[in-house]
Amino acid sequence: MKNLSKANENKLINYPRLHLVAVAVCSLTLVLALTLLPSPDATATKTVRLKTPVSEKQAEEPAIAPAKLAPREQLATLSSERTTLNNAQSINPAAPVTTHTSQDWKVEKIRSGDTLSHIFKRVGLTSKDVHSVMSGGGEVKTLAKIQPNQTIKFNIQDDTLQALEYIISRTESLLVEKSDNGYQAIRSIKNLKPFTSYAEGTINSSLFLAAQKAGLSDNLTMSLAGIFGWDVDFALDIREGDSFKVIYQELYLNGEKVKDGQILAAEFTNQGKTFTAVRYDSPTQGSNYYTPEGDSMRKAFLRSPIDFARISSHFNLSRKHPVLHTIRAHKGTDYAASRGTPIKATGDGKVVYAGRKGGYGNVVIIQHGQTYKTLYAHMNNYARGIRSGKRVRQGQVIGYVGSTGLATGPHLHYEFYQNGAVRNPVTVKLPHAEPIAKADKNAFLALSKQMQGQLSTYAAAMKSENLARLGE
Ligand SMILES: [Zn+2]
């Protein structure tokens, strides 16, 4: 099991029996060749991890295609992959190549409150040097963003700064070198190696707890919620027994995990209904998540213009008005929220009205293409720059909750129109955002099929691992 990452080796040391199980499993069949590492406190929630090196091309564009499932081959090539990795380090084109030896460099750690001048002074340089460096070429302005605990290395010879290296993070640095045309800065990013991982879990109380048990970071959990948040309201819709499966990337540098990469594919089952999402990186449309058929996971509209608000009054075309006490249609949904709560545009569009309008008080009306229109009433005030004719993006704050017009207290009154007819914003079927581009369709469908296959293969491997454990 030389091919396992450090982190996993450590895990295995803690679980020698599982290690043996994993070894036995590895040598058997294609599916079982996956490396199975149940989380330490695995109960209802388990995680399977498969570290899969992807090709060099994919390493440059980590999210485009997932690693192929060919575990036997992988096991054979893993050790050579490691070697490649080590070689890559020494010839990494992104790594600063300098002729200076290490003893030439003065290393300064950036302290809280430091400016470049402070640091330069500490190594014997002057504010004139700061000025010449900062008026240099390339990405030298990066030096304006120094943070405490980062490091700058200085190479000074005969009181002249020859070069400095600003270590931005474990993977990023900026090298500034003296040249005939002043200082030149080059930013370098080390290539992280993506490995494919799989995790699955069943929710007992909250998505976050289940995801944590499955070994997912908070960031990945947020991404997961973001992907399915158009179909599932994670505050209101989650039930015990809901479950998820995720194929994602972990990014390694020199055999050590640096951070999580992207979610490549995921499945979420909510109240018996299963949603599947596949990531696709299009050269023209950017990165998006799609249904297996190629519809966008994103909807053209957010379900609600306010986060985590309580609905205080539903859409009802024959309701008694709370202020006028007569039968008057309630043509929208009321969200109770405190004064000043930000209100978001639910879709991309153009503001066609922003001003006072009778009982609506301060109101914004947005036109979304030919078909849709949304209205936001009783605003306390508008967000900066919101006026008639202004284009807005989905999620952009357009104003703040208030009680202007006919309102008993601060709330947002939200209306949704389709082809001129008012609809219930809570139940109206929301249109999807742009589907996969025609040019990408075939490639996407092939990827989609492959990812769905991987999801079920991993899940099956997980299941047999569980059965094996039960039999112990
Ligand atoms: Zn209302």
Image: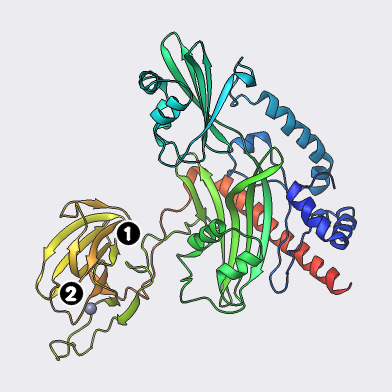
Q: Quadrant of residue 265?
A: bottom right
| Quadrant position of ligand 1 | bottom left
Q: Mark 2 is on which residue type?
A: Ser
| Cα gap from disc 1 to disc 2, whole angstroms | 23 Å
**Mark 1 closeness class: few <14, some 14–19, many ≥20 residues within 10 Å:** many
Toward the viewer: 334 or 112?
Answer: 112
Compared across the picture, whether 101 is left or right of 464 comes to left
The secondary structure type at the circle numbered 2 is loop
Picture layout, residue 63 above or below residue 25: above
Picture layout, residue 106 above or below residue 180: below
The residue at 41%/56% (across/down) is 433
Q: Residue 190: image x %, image y %?
A: 60, 33
Q: In which quarter of the image is residue 45?
A: bottom right
N-term-proximal mark, 1 vs 2: 1
Q: Which of the labelled discs sits on residue 403, or is there none?
A: 2
Q: Mark 1 is on which residue type?
A: Gly
Q: Which of the labelled discs sits on residue 32, or is there none?
A: none
Instruction: Please give the residue where the numbered disc 1 appears in the rendered image.
Output: 347
The residue at 28%/58% (across/down) is 397
The secondary structure type at the circle numbered 1 is loop
Q: Residue 50: image x %, image y %?
A: 74, 53
Q: Residue 286: image x %, image y %?
A: 46, 44
The residue at 58%/22% (across/down) is 105
**Mark 2 closeness class: few <14, some 14–19, many ≥20 residues within 10 Å:** many
Picture layout, residue 109 above or below residue 267: above
The residue at 12%/88% (across/down) is 324
